[in-house]
Image (cartoon, grey):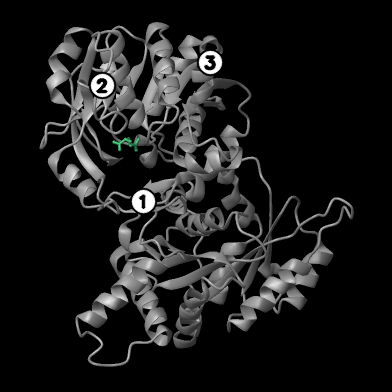
């Protein structure tokens, strides 16, 4: 067992260059060597968690087993490290301040004047060490949100600096920077990265390594230049990370440049060879795939363009890809704005061009009539359908309206006045809303579910009892269950403690499954989620 070594990952130049994936990939190359690895995300915002933020602003809210609403990067950590990441591996400025203030109110600082420095960085360090102890990590990779030079993450950088000062041999800094190739020059420029490195120096941090992201790989002269001008020990400490086809290739990119060896040397870690090779093998395998399956994803959150969209559904996208690859095909995903089908109902026929349809989670009224029309189409045309959370709720509403004949069937979220609230609210949730308690109060995290013998889900999971992660406020009303089942929508998954409906399926349909939970959070690169695998299988049959 190696004592915990800490690798801080800090961004330079601009955001969104793949710090999260780099963090996860650094973890992966150590995991491949048999080290126990964990990862922490530090987010600079004041929000205590990501749960109350609009997905258009924040991207996906990733839910942990223990019900924390976190940043999407934790999803990457779970997918790359093949391990569950818990609440204690995540912090925000809001969370750190909240606990310092609570400690102060509880006299835990013993009458001292509590100050921003050192008490805030000390709390950050305390949290990092606590996570290391809880996870028993030999390698802890810590991603600091934001970019060097920002005002917001300065106290986190200070925490990192203090940790290095305390244990110089146990802490390394990785600057993930971007090297642009301006169109009019056609040449890769190192200057922004030089500035980023200087800016880090101003916070008392000297990068040990630079991961140079960019549209192309770094050449030798630029590698040398960066090493010298950014104060690195040698040019091998600059790692080129050009754009690749799939993020899952990044560990290979790092491996080829002996990044793990360099880190082990720097941190005095007894060197270990790669022992886990399945990741690598699977990356090579998917590289050869040439056929694809066409999947339509229907939802909203399209208002600010494709980029935000992809971010809002990042785990769904990954789950689809994993399942497709394991079926030997690529996933060709098309994003359809459900409002399009409200404005142009005749367009719904286009769905016939796809092999399967997914409706991911969502909130609120906008676009839902278009989603309901989509579900009707999938149900009536034997088009494989997977509904995730809202996608399950809206499937029960569609069925109630068009099969049971409850024309006003609805969810209380959108139309509290409806006489047939198929999706309703329980007492605790009603109290939460009445008292404006929105933060962290949904039904969150892992809950058990018992599957019905002979159902699609039961066959796919190959188990009777499963556990899946939740994030929703409203529930199916059991009052409608019998009638629905008589007409062909079967409840195939139920929570054994609360009797809440977790899964519905349509009888005599090739694949129509709606789940109240979010299976996408548990899909892994090497271990795809059974429900997504089932959907892709059905899609391939439907081709
Ligand atoms: N809006 C629904 C609810 O709160 C569904 C949530 C979701 O899809 N995550 O119950």
Image-quadrant location for residue 467: top left
Relative image position of residue 186 (x, y in whole percent): 87, 52
The residue to which callout 2 is attached is 504
Q: Tag 2, which secondary structure?
A: strand
Work out which quarter of the rendered image holds the N terminus and state it: bottom left
In the depicted structure, whether residue 206 falls above or below residue 541: below
Answer whether residue 405 is visible to the viewer in this image.
yes
Relative image position of residue 523 (x, y in whole percent): 40, 38
Circle 3 residues within 10 Å: few <14, some 14–19, many ≥20: some
Circle 2 residues within 10 Å: few <14, some 14–19, many ≥20: many
Q: Which circle's residue, 2 or 1, is located before the other in the chain?
A: 1
* Residue at (45% x, 81% y) in the render: 163
The residue to which callout 1 is attached is 51
Q: Which circle's residue, 1 or 3, is located before the other in the chain?
A: 1
Answer whether residue 270 is visible to the viewer in this image.
no
* Residue at (10% x, 37% y) in the render: 497
Q: Tag 1, which secondary structure?
A: loop
Q: CA distance from mark 2 to mark 3?
A: 22 Å
Front of the two marks 2 and 1: 1
The residue to which callout 3 is attached is 354
In the depicted structure, whether residue 398 falls above or below residue 5: above
Furthest-right residue in this view: 185
In the depicted structure, whether residue 218 falls above or below residue 502: below
Q: Which circle's residue, 2 or 3, is located before the other in the chain?
A: 3
Image side of residue 56 versus residue 108, left or right: right
């Amino acid at each position: 067992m190696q004592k915990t070594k800490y690798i801080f990952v800090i961004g330079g130049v601009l955001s969104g260059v793949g710090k999260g994936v780099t963090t996860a990939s650094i973890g992966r190359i150590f995991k491949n060597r048999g080290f126990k690895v964990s990862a922490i995300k530090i987010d600079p915002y004041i929000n205590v968690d990501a749960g109350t933020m609009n997905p258009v602003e924040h991207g996906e809210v990733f839910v942990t087993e223990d019900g924390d609403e976190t940043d999407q990067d934790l999803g990457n950590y779970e997918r790359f490290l093949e391990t569950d990441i818990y609440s204690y591996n995540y912090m925000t400025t809001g969370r750190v301040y909240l606990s310092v203030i609570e400690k102060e109110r509880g006299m835990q600082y013993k009458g001292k004047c509590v100050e921003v420095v050192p008490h805030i960085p000390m709390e950050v360090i305390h949290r990092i060490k606590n996570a290391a102890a809880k996870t028993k990590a030999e390698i802890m990779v810590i991603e600091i949100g934001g970019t060097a030079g920002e005002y917001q993450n300065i106290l986190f950088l200070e925490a990192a600096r203090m940790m290095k000062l305390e244990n110089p041999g146990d802490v390394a800094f990785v600057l993930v920077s971007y090297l642009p190739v301006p169109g009019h020059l056609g040449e890769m420029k190192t200057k922004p990265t030089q500035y980023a490195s200087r800016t880090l120096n101003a916070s008392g941090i000297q990068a040990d390594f630079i991961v140079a992201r960019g549209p192309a790989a770094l050449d030798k002269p630029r590698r040398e230049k960066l090493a010298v001008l950014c104060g690195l020990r040698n040019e091998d400490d600059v790692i080129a990370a050009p754009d690749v086809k799939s993020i899952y290739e990044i560990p290979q990119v790092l491996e080829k440049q002996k990044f793990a060896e360099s880190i082990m040397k720097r941190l005095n870690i007894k060197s270990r060879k790669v022992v886990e090779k399945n990741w690598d093998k699977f990356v090579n395998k998917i590289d050869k795939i040439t056929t694809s399956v066409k999947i339509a994803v229907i939802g909203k959150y399209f208002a600010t363009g494709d980029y935000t969209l992809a971010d809002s559904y990042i785990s769904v996208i990954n789950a689809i890809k994993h399942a497709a690859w394991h079926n030997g095909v690529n996933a060709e995903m098309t994003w359809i704005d459900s409002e399009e089908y409200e404005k142009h109902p005749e367009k719904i026929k286009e769905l016939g061009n796809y092999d399967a349809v997914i409706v991911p989670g969502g909130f609120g009224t906008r676009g839902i009539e278009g989603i309901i029309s989509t579900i009707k189409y999938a149900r009536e045309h034997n088009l494989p359908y997977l509904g995730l959370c809202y996608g399950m709720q809206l499937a029960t509403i569609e069925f109630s309206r068009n099969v049971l004949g409850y024309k006003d069937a609805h969810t209380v979220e959108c139309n509290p006045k409806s006489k047939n609230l198929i999706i309703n609210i329980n007492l605790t949730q009603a109290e939460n809303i009445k008292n404006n308690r929105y933060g962290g109060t949904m039904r969150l995290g892992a809950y058990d579910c018992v599957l019905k013998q002979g159902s699609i889900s039961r066959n796919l999971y190959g188990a009777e009892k499963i556990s899946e992660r939740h994030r929703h406020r409203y529930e199916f009303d059991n009052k409608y269950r019998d009638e629905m089942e008589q007409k062909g929508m079967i409840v195939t998954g139920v929570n054994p403690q609360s009797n809440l409906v977790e899964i519905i399926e349509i009888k005599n349909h090739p694949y129509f499954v709606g789940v109240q939970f979010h299976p996408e959070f548990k899909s892994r690169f090497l271990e795809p989620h059974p429900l997504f695998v089932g959907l892709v299988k059905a899609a391939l049959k439907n081709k």
